[in-house]
Amino acid sequence: MSDTGKLKVAAQSEREIVMTRRFNAPRRMLFDAWTKTELLKRWLGVFGGNTLEVCEIDLRVGGKYRFVWRLADGSEMGMGGTYLEIVPRERMVWTEMFDVPWYPGESLITVTLTEQDGRTTATTTVLYVSQQARDGVLRTNMERGVGLSYDKLAEILETT
């Protein structure tokens, strides 16, 4: 595997987390990986025996998405939201709410894809309802889970 970097996670402002990773692939491939069900099911949260069983996307402003994972222990974790902004191959903004919330409120996710010399930096900003919610997420294993997902994505991009 020859990805170009590992996940970087940082608190930003009182309510945000920013996650950045550079991939050895053009941004059109990253955009597809975030928006095509057949690709998402191969990398998003798919590690340690987890599978993405439900992956529904209505990719348009105002469109909804729904994801349900079957976790290694047999339980399910579901979430969904609404797409608020889509600039193909550049930027997406959506809401995120878990069926069984593990942090309070709905979050706002912004993914920006910046390409340079055939490599793409994916910057994901998550805005939470409060600093307490953000800090609670930072104390979980979220960073590990996102890192494992992005490692899987890097492998897929290398073989596509």
Image (cartoon, rainbow, N blue to C red):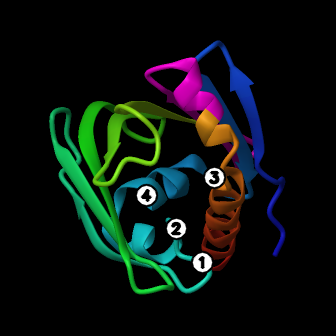
Mark 2 residue type: Gly
- The residue nearer to you, when weighing 138 against 118, is 138
Q: Which residues are magenta?
A: 114-135
Mark 2 or mark 4, which is nearer to you? 2
Asked if one can make out residue 118 in the rendered structure from this viewpoint, the answer is no
Are discs 1 and 2 less than 8 Å apart at CB? yes
Secondary structure under the numbered disc 4 in the rendered image: helix
Any part of residue 141 in sight? yes
The answer to whether residue 70 is left or right of residue 142 is left
Query: Relative to 90, is 44 above or below?
Result: below
Label 1 close to label 3 by CB (< 8 Å): no
What residue would you read off at disc 1? 47
Label 2 residue SS: loop
| Tag count | 4
Q: Quadrant of residue 83?
A: top left
Task: Determine whether, in the image, residue 110 is placed left or right of residue 23.
Answer: left
Crowd class of label 4 (few under 14; some 14 to 19; many from 20; radius 10 Å): some
What's the CA distance linking mark 2 and mark 4? 17 Å
Q: Image quadrant of residue 20?
A: top right
* Label 3 secondary element: helix
Q: Does 80 appear in magenta?
A: no
Q: Earlier in the sequence, mark 2 or mark 3?
A: 2
